[in-house]
Amino acid sequence: MDEVFKALADPNRRQLLDNLNAHNGQTLRELCSGLAMARQSVSKHLAVLEAANLVTAVRRGREKLHYLNAEPINAIADRWINQYDRQRVHALADLKTALEQQPMNNPEFVYTTYINTTPQRLWQALTAPAFTRRYWGLAFDTDWQAGSTMTWHERGSTITDPAQVVLEAEPHRKLSYTWHTFTPQWAEGSGIDDETLTKIAAEPRSKVTFEIEQVDDIVKLTVVHDGFEPDSTVLGMITQGWPALLSGLKTLLETGEALPEPAAHND
């Protein structure tokens, strides 16, 4: 948490965060074009923000895109903003609110968190029903091989579709799969009204990717959920849901205790 406050203390770094908040997913060149700083200076500031987990960098071919990351702001909110009502935390509260809003550019969700666990244990938590039922309230039926279909079991409903497939599976390193089908049975169990169901069912199927990286004695988990159209309703829903779900995953792995099950699914 100290690293976050130190990173936010510099006005140039706050400007970088403001720029990413206005247009998320920018290259170094794009960020430099909006600042009166040398490329090397911008790069150094980004390194500090990445070290504080306020910015996440994701490779897209030859490009490296930078995203504002909500995890440390949510942690500060839990520790300070929700406990005190003081002027000195209003800026953080505003940033937390902005991070929770649906992105206007680059329609995708990117989130990074650090967990005191091992890559093997994290992989198990992402795939094994004994884990996923505890923090997610669902289970997957698949052999976790690339190209294999996935059946989702959640809230008494079974969701099957040939397009629900595993895209990539490198144990303890990377996992990617297409998102589930929005069925009437799932919607009823998740409290989704008919109008919303009609909207989200008409959207293209999205996909989620989990990237696992050992960093010293902890594990860095980056979640990228993409494949959305601009103004996607599903994107707005998962943007609200993923932070809480990943907090539950982190809590389970670090303490052995699951958070209370959420009232509705994260999408």
Image (cartoon, rainbow, N blue to C red):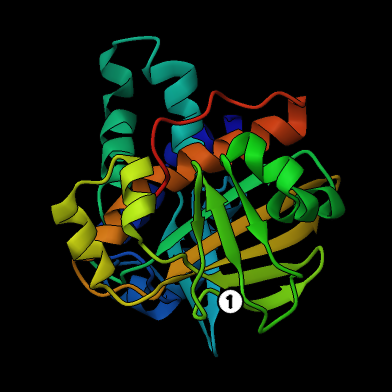
* Residue on which the image places disc 1: 165
- State the residue at coordinates (32%, 72%): 228
Identified at 72% across, 61% down, the residue is 212
**199 sits left or right of 256 in the view:** left
Tell me: 224 left or right of 19.
Answer: right
Secondary structure at badge 1 equals: loop
Q: Tell me if residue 205 can be seen.
A: yes
In the rendered image, residue 171, in percent from the top left (x then y), is placed at 81, 67
- 41, 215: nearer the viewer: 215
Question: Residue 4: horizontal and vertical position, in percent?
Answer: 52, 37
Q: Which of 18 and 23 is in front in this view?
A: 23
Kind of residue at disc 1: Val
Q: Residue at x 66, y 45 (%)?
A: 132
Frontmost residue, 220 versus 23: 220
Q: In which quarter of the image is residue 35?
A: bottom left
Could you tell me if residue 3 is visible in this image?
Answer: no
- Above or below, 170 against 158 in this view is below
Of residues 29 and 174, the one nearer the viewer is 174
